[in-house]
Amino acid sequence: MAKNKPQKLFKYCLSVLISGCLGFVLFPAFSSAQLGSQNINTNIVNINQDSPATIDPSSLSTEELNQSIQEKQDQKKLIEEKLKKYQDIIAEKQKTQASLKNELELLDAQIEKSQLDAQALNFTVEEKQLQINATQKAISEKEKEIDKQRSYLEELVRTINRYDQRDQLEMLITRDSFSEIINDIRSTSKLENQVSDSLTEIRQIKSNLERERVERERQKLELQSLQKELEGTVAGLGDQKDYKAKILDETKSNEQTYSNLLEQAKQEQLTADYDIRNLQEKLKTKLGGQNTNNSDQNTIFTGNRDVQLAWPISPGKGISAYFHDPTYPYRKYFEHPAIDIPASQGTSIAAADDGYVARTKNGGFGYSYIMLVHSNSVATVYGHVSQINVAEDTYVKKGQIIGLSGGLPGTPGAGNLTTGAHLHFEVRLNGIPVNPLDYLP
């Protein structure tokens, strides 16, 4: 009879072990209720229900993707070697006395460099896209492995359920010897171990899957940042070409005309510097000792609140000219009293701190700027603005939008011989320019 009903054993074995008839436990206590197919299926659904839609724009294999990534990296290395050549040319030209010939040669080198920068960034963008595809393939493979393990586990659970549905007494009387019971118990222990191993493997695969998903999202954010940087580089390249065209148009390739433009730019800066110094001193005398009913004014001009400036625009594109920058192209005419922060034309400018609007200078197509006075004799100046959104003799809060950036050649507020779209940002202490980076986070 044992040969006719060889499968009627599992429930009996569980009963014997639980009742203590053998006096010891031969395997981990996984009950059939704990391992029922309904519970297991629910667990697997939860693992997969947040899986993203498959993103597979390429039919490349993982090996082919990795090879393509390496090719992009090799192409970037070749561009970096060319970039060094133009960086050396630019550095040399920046040390040379300003002249139309030198300025045009410098612009040509900067344009070539910007074109190479754009190519390198484009390869980086393509490389990042390939990395995202490779990560997505890894995610898909892990999801398939989870499905495979799920199917295996479900089959184990179905086997357990079939044993559960047999009558215990019937299983007991079908065995011819106690050794058969022991052998079946060992088989049952092996089955339970397989269930445990399968669950452990699923948990590990799920953990790896979550890490891949996190990595994919990080790569996507990097890709977005790279794409913005590429857009900015391409826009900057356009600005440089426009600037070169403007110089050629205004000078008619005449050195004397170029010298006259440089002199105008110098006088423009000297006038702005003189006005800012005098105005800050007058305001300090006028408002510094007053105790008024205006809480904003009292906060700014009385007390010793430390000045902690915020970036007026994002420095995501870096800094194109530093305070007293030795490479500044017009340094032989005047020191650069600020930092230049590249920004697309019309970028919103935020007040770097609470302040009093001391001056809004609309220079038409000449140099336009906004000056704010803060506590502890600190003032900030925002130059090459294309639009002014605040009025003089008013108060602004930190982060409030005060205007729009400019700097494109030939546009409102840019002034003479601007070097492209950017914000000219000054910090002054008692009217004297100081390094803005000492006040920024």
Image (cartoon, rainbow, N blue to C red):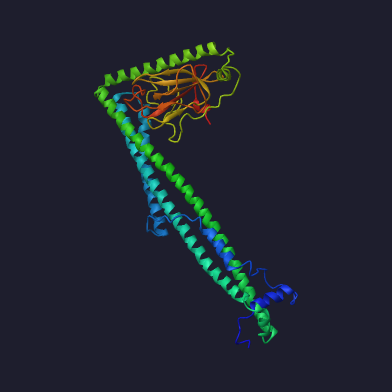
Q: Which of 11 and 289 is in front in this view?
A: 11
State which quadrant residue 102 falls in. top left
Residue 121 found in image quarter: top left
What x and y, as percent, mark residue 382? Answer: 44, 24
Q: Residue at x 62, y 71 (%)?
A: 192
267 or 345, nearer to the observer = 345
Displayed quadrant of residue 285: top right
In the rendered image, the vertical position of residue 134 relative to residue 377, given as above or below: below
Residue 297 in the image, given as x and y percentages of width and height: 55, 18
Question: Left or right: where does residue 262 sit relative to residue 282?
Answer: left
Residue placed at 48% from the left, 63% from the top? 144
Q: How many marks?
A: 0
Q: Is residue 388 visible?
A: yes
In the rendered image, which quarter contains the N terminus? bottom right
Residue 282 in the image: state x and y as whole percent.
50, 11
429 up-or-down from 42: above or below: above
Percent of width and height locating residue 253: 24, 24
